[in-house]
Image (cartoon, grey):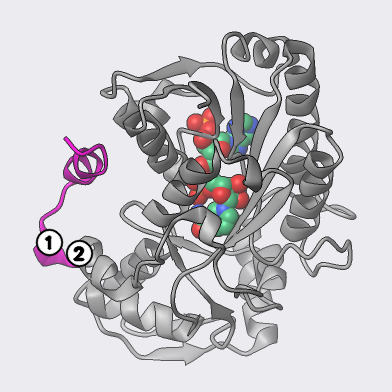
Amino acid sequence: MYKSVLLIGGSGFLGTAVALKLAAQGRRVVVPTRRIKNADTLLMVPQVEVVQADVNDDSTLVGLMQGVDAVINLVGILQGGNGNPYGDRFARAHVELPQRIVRAMKMKNVKRLLHVSALGVTGSQSSPSMYLRSKTDGERVVRGSFLNWTIYRPSVVFGPGDSFLNLFAKLAALAPILPLAGANVRFQPVYVEDVARGIANTLDNPEAEEKTYELAGPRVYTLRQLVDIAARCSGNPRPIIAMPGPLAWLQAVAMEMAPGEPLMSRDNLNSMKIDNVATCAASTDLGIKPTALEPIAMQYLSPASGLTSMDIHRGRAHR
Ligand SMILES: NC(=O)c1ccc[n+]([C@@H]2O[C@H](COP(=O)([O-])OP(=O)(O)OC[C@H]3O[C@@H](n4cnc5c(N)ncnc54)[C@H](OP(=O)(O)O)[C@@H]3O)[C@@H](O)[C@H]2O)c1
């Protein structure tokens, strides 16, 4: 069993769930973050060591490998600037970071690497978005590493604290109607706990090496259906109006020009040019039975649930 795991990107939404699963399996988990506050829910977990560190610094990264026997990389961003084939920030987070992780692992003789990519990556540079093209190149780095790698491609991930259904629930609370770009694009949302379990279950399995796993839920939905579920579960059912392509494009340009991270970019629209659904049935290696979305969404989006984020994390940590 890999007893000590460096979980890069472990402070995020999916990373927190993975950290809790690995800790529950009795492993030591090291979680680097650029801001300790991002990982505050993990500070309570005894087996998890949260370290303030920037993994973009090579010597820091090598230092973090000290005493670990496996590395999991979950770093991913949705907005990475513009460029051909992708913007600089996509290059740094999705391609150069995996390259530096591989180099650091070789220096420290760490051989097991788990890498989280995304559903929609086809392995081709003709992918419609910079996000997908940079994720494709990140996978290529991992496959060519000669390490004992496993790649995971989740569809959109739902669960308490997600930035997908929660976003639409928030918009429904603010607006009387919901204009929607990409209303007919299809997704196969997967529960955060299932993704975390799938990753934790395959870590020690030699059969999982040099394999790429798709992670998707039991049902395919259009984006319109998902937005409707988010609005209804949060107690704010709203009419949804499909936005014509050119209007969605103009809206994305305006959002990109506003200060801060855009809610929607042209690249996000490009990602939605292809459906986000699994190409095959879930592998039995993952040891999961995909969880249905509606009952879980009802639990965390419903205003009546009264769940605080602390309750949710205690529940996840089985405490
Ligand atoms: N959530 C989904 O629906 C979904 C769907 C498909 C694929 N994925 C993939 O799953 C992975 C995890 O997603 P998530 O939703 O958990 O993301 P998240 O909540 O945004 O967390 C991102 C993590 O990456 C780290 N990070 C971000 N940019 C970084 C950078 N430039 N340098 C170093 N660290 C950086 C953050 O660490 P700090 O604490 O240092 O900020 C954080 O731990 C990503 O690779 C994502 O592409 C997610």
Q: Using the rendered image of the protein, determine whether residue 261 is visible from the camera's viewpoint.
A: no
Q: Amino acid at mark 1?
A: Ser
Q: Which of the numbered marks, if any, corresponds to residue 66?
A: none
Q: Residues within 10 Å of mark 1 (few under 14, many from 20)?
A: few
Q: Which residue is mark 2?
A: 299
The answer to whether the residues at label 2 and label 1 have Cβ atoms under 8 Å apart is yes
Horizontal placement of 238 versus 198: left or right? left
Mark 1 lies on residue: 305
Q: From which residue to which does the magenta span run?
A: 302-319
Dividing the picture into quarters, in which one does residue 72 lie?
top right
Give x and y (percent) for residue 207: 64, 46
Residue 28 in sight here: yes
Rendering coords of residue 231 (x, y %): 30, 77
**In the image: residue 224, left or right of residue 58:** left
The quadrant where residue 106 appears: top right
Q: Is residue 220 above or below residue 309?
A: below
**Mark 2 surroundings within 10 Å by alpha-carbon count, few (fewer than 14), some (14 through 19), many (20 or more):** some
- Nearest to N terminus: mark 2 or mark 1: 2
Residue 259, above or below 235: above
Q: Is residue 307 a member of the stretch shown in magenta?
A: yes
Please tell me whether mark 1 sits on a helix, a strand or a loop. Answer: helix
Q: Is residue 28 above or below residue 79?
A: above
What secondary structure prevails in the magenta region?
Answer: helix
- In the image, residue 206 sits, relative to residue 249, either above or below, namely above
Q: Nearer the viewer, residue 229 or 155?
A: 155
Q: Of helix, strand and loop, which one carries label 2?
A: helix
| Residue visible at 74% across and 52% down in the picture | 135
Q: Position of residue 79 (x, y in %)?
A: 65, 51
Quadrant placement of the C terminus: top left
Q: Residue at x 88, y 55 (%)?
A: 85
Q: Residue at x 67, y 33 (%)?
A: 113
Count of numbered marks: 2
